[in-house]
Image (cartoon, helix red, strand yellow):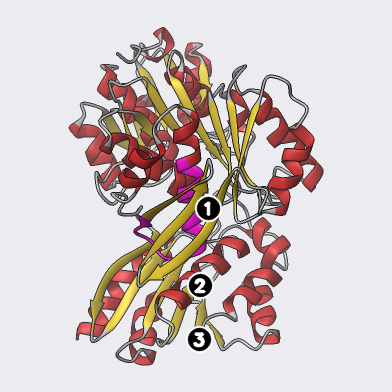
């Protein structure tokens, strides 16, 4: 039986309750019986789902939205200090809790699996959640995206396992004490919070150091940053380390990945035996995520062959190479990729899945700071497409940086030989792409911002 509600979380108020991480915690608390309330900038399907669970969700931010009897106010790093509800909390002396602390409190007393890495966290966490649920273990989970199957990013289960996406962007993953931690990769990102790779490594080392004594680190044997992290933590005496990947030295070795259209067949060598299973998304990047999930489940004592079969039930996560539809012989797929490594992985996956098709990309850069540091690499990644449209930068939580625009990406893409066009008016994209696309083509909307909204609009134009 899962634990109940921490006292401080009996009547929580979430500022930005509609966000992926915040809404997941709110859903779990609501399912555990807490009196959940919160606000968000706009109406959404997430807000409606929370209301269906009994939560009170207000649209917009105002001091009056915060009830006097709230036991805490939950915030993410994106909430600014001048938020009126945050100011009201100070007036009422209501404790302010970071979402990572709220999530950590929900994991207490459970066998936690924390999934970390610069890329692939949502997919890997989702694969574990689906597989463990399929095996009847009824886990709790909190994910940074909605599962394509259950259609939710979090649930309260009655089992003793809690699977959580562990966010390194603001160092919040250092709050968790997992029994098993997965590190998929370690790269420089989140430039507003990390100035160097040394700071990134220090942060990941702290995260690994929080694994409970006798617990397990599952870590890539292929990715250079993960390999370096393994070297740095190798001497932690209370830590079991399990490596996975294509390296001959990997404890769980990827023997073969066979593309099967928009799926893959993966064969691994585990304890000297071959094990083959299906992954329902294309590309080696996602196949490796599945192998990491397999290794983590085995570390919890779950039979490998059972896990392998259950992983085949995973049907994807919204915005992770999600097929939005087909019209006029053109498939439209949505990708959350916004870092050059992710972009390259998804573009290569689509190339492998449909090698005879043209690949057209609509890319929306995410964050000024990321574009400033990685714009050249983003442009180089777009050279894998047959043609690309690049939108203006989606600012999210950031203010503009002088001189940092999508032009940085476009210039790099053209230098790499890419066919790329700047489009400043997002509303003009659907008609433009519909005019470019021919039967058999693939269209990929790519980015972490609202570029995802364009997929259905492109399909409408193709149908007309």
Q: In this image, 352 relative to 150: left or right?
A: right
Residue 304, horizontal then vertical, whole percent: 41, 39
Residue 347: mark: 2
- Work out whether residue 311 can be spotted: yes
Residue 214, horizontal then vertical, whole percent: 60, 19
* Quarter occupied by residue 456: bottom left
Q: CA distance from mark 2 to mark 1?
A: 24 Å
* Quarter occupied by residue 366: bottom right
Q: Which residue is mark 3?
A: 387
What is the magenta range?
278-294
Asked if disc 2 and disc 1 are in contact, CB closer than 8 Å, the reply is no
Looking at the picture, tell me which residue is in the foreground, 101 or 204.
204
Q: Nearer the viewer, mark 1 or mark 3?
A: 3
Question: Which residue is at the far front?
Answer: 272
Query: Crowdedness of circle 1 by 10 Å Cα count: few (<14), some, many (20+)?
Result: few
Q: Which residue is mark 1?
A: 396
* Quarter occupied by residue 344: bottom right
Q: Nearer the viewer, mark 2 or mark 1?
A: 2
| SS of the residue under disc 1 | loop
Asked if disc 1 and disc 3 are in contact, CB closer than 8 Å, the reply is no
Q: CA distance from mark 1 to mark 3?
A: 26 Å
Residue 284 in the image: above or below residue 191:
below
| SS of the residue under disc 2 | helix
Residue 332, horizontal then vertical, whole percent: 33, 74
Residue 330: mark: none
Q: In this image, 404 relative to 44: left or right?
A: right
* Residue at 47%, 25% in the rendered image: 112
């Amino acid at each position: 039986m899962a634990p109940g509600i921490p006292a401080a979380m009996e009547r929580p108020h979430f500022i930005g309750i509609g966000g992926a991480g915040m809404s997941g915690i709110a859903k779990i608390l609501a399912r555990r019986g807490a009196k959940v309330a919160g606000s968000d900038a706009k109406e959404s399907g997430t807000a409606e789902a929370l209301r269906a669970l009994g939560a009170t969700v207000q649209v917009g931010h105002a001091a009056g939205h915060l009830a006097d009897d709230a036991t805490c106010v939950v915030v993410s790093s994106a909430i600014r200090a001048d938020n009126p509800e945050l100011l009201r909390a100070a007036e009422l002396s209501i404790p302010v809790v970071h979402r990572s602390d709220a999530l950590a409190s929900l994991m207490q007393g459970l066998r936690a699996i924390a999934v970390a890495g610069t890329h692939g966290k949502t997919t890997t966490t989702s694969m574990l959640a689906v597989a463990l649920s399929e095996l009847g273990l009824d886990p709790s989970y909190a994910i940074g995206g909605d599962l394509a199957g259950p259609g939710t990013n979090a649930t309260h289960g009655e089992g003793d396992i809690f699977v959580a996406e562990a966010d390194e962007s603001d160092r919040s993953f250092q709050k968790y004490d997992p029994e098993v931690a997965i590190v998929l990769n370690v790269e420089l990102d989140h430039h507003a919070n990390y100035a160097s790779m040394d700071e990134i490594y220090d942060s990941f080392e702290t995260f690994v150091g929080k694994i409970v004594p006798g617990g397990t680190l599952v870590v890539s044997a292929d990715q250079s940053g993960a390999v370096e992290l393994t070297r740095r933590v190798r001497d932690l005496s209370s830590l079991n380390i399990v490596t996975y990947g294509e390296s001959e030295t990997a404890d769980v070795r990827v023997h073969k990945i066979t593309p099967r259209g928009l799926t893959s067949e993966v064969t691994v060598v585990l304890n000297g035996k071959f094990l083959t299973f299906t992954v329902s998304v294309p590309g080696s990047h996602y196949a490796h995520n599945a192998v990491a999930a397999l290794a983590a489940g085995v570390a919890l004592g779950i039979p490998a062959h059972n896990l392998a079969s259950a992983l085949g039930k995973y049907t994807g996560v919204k915005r992770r190479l999600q097929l939005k539809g087909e019209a006029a012989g053109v498939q439209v797929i949505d990708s959350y990729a916004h870092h050059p490594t992710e972009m390259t992985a998804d573009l290569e996956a689509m190339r492998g899945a449909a090698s005879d098709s043209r690949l057209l990309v609509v890319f929306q850069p995410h964050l000024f700071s990321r574009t400033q540091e990685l714009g050249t690499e983003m442009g180089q990644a777009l050279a894998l497409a047959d043609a690309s449209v690049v939108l203006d930068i989606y600012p999210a939580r950031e203010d503009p940086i002088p001189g940092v625009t999508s032009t940085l990406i476009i210039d790099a893409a053209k230098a790499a030989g890419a066919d790329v066009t700047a489009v400043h008016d997002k509303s003009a994209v659907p008609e433009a792409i519909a005019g470019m696309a021919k039967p058999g083509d693939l269209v990929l909307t790519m980015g972490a911002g609202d570029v995802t909204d364009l997929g259905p609009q492109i399909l409408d134009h193709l149908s007309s």
